[in-house]
Image (cartoon, rainbow, N blue to C red):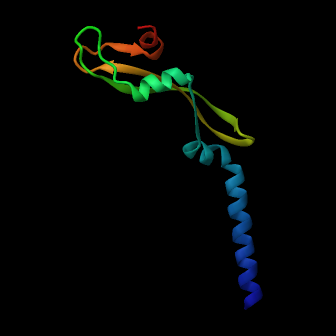
Amino acid sequence: MNDNLLFVLGVFLVIAFIVTIVNYKKLGSKFNRSYSGEISLKEIKNFYFKKQYCNHCNQKLIRVHDKEFIEEGWDNINGTHFYGKKYKVKTYLKCQECQKKYKLEDLMKE
């Protein structure tokens, strides 16, 4: 009885392992994502720790992060390989009154 149970459990594990390997691309892409963006230390300081105001209506600007889909494929982060979706993050500030968008580089010049 014990041998039959171990055999059935072993067959089940082998089938589950094979199904996971065959469907790895489809299963992994639902959960794995990588994000990339460029921001300097001065931009981080101004973005998070300094209040910014609109040049036109003098209202407080809100932080906005837009994600742009790049591709789906293999990626490597710190030596870990995975299959998933890749996104590029664009960060900017937006005025709620006049809907004007400000890039972080533009606010650094002012």
Quarter containing the C terminus:
top left
Q: Quadrant of residue 2?
A: bottom right
- Is 30 or 33 nearer to us in this picture? 33
Residue 20 drawn at (x, y percent): 67, 55
Establish if 94 lies above or below 27. above
- Residue found at the far bottom of this picture: 1
Quarter containing the N terminus:
bottom right
Residue 35 drawn at (x, y percent): 57, 32
Taking the spot 69% from the left edge, 35% from the top edge, the residue there is: 75
Residue 47 drawn at (x, y percent): 43, 25
**Tally of marks:** 0
Residue 5 drawn at (x, y percent): 71, 84
Q: Quadrant of residue 103?
A: top left
In the displayed structure image, the side of residue 56 where residue 33 appears, left or right? right
Residue 65: tell me if it is visible.
no
- Is 74 or 54 nearer to us in this picture? 54
In the displayed structure image, the side of residue 89 where residue 97 appears, left or right? left
In the displayed structure image, the side of residue 89 where residue 25 appears, left or right? right
Residue 62: tell me if it is visible.
yes
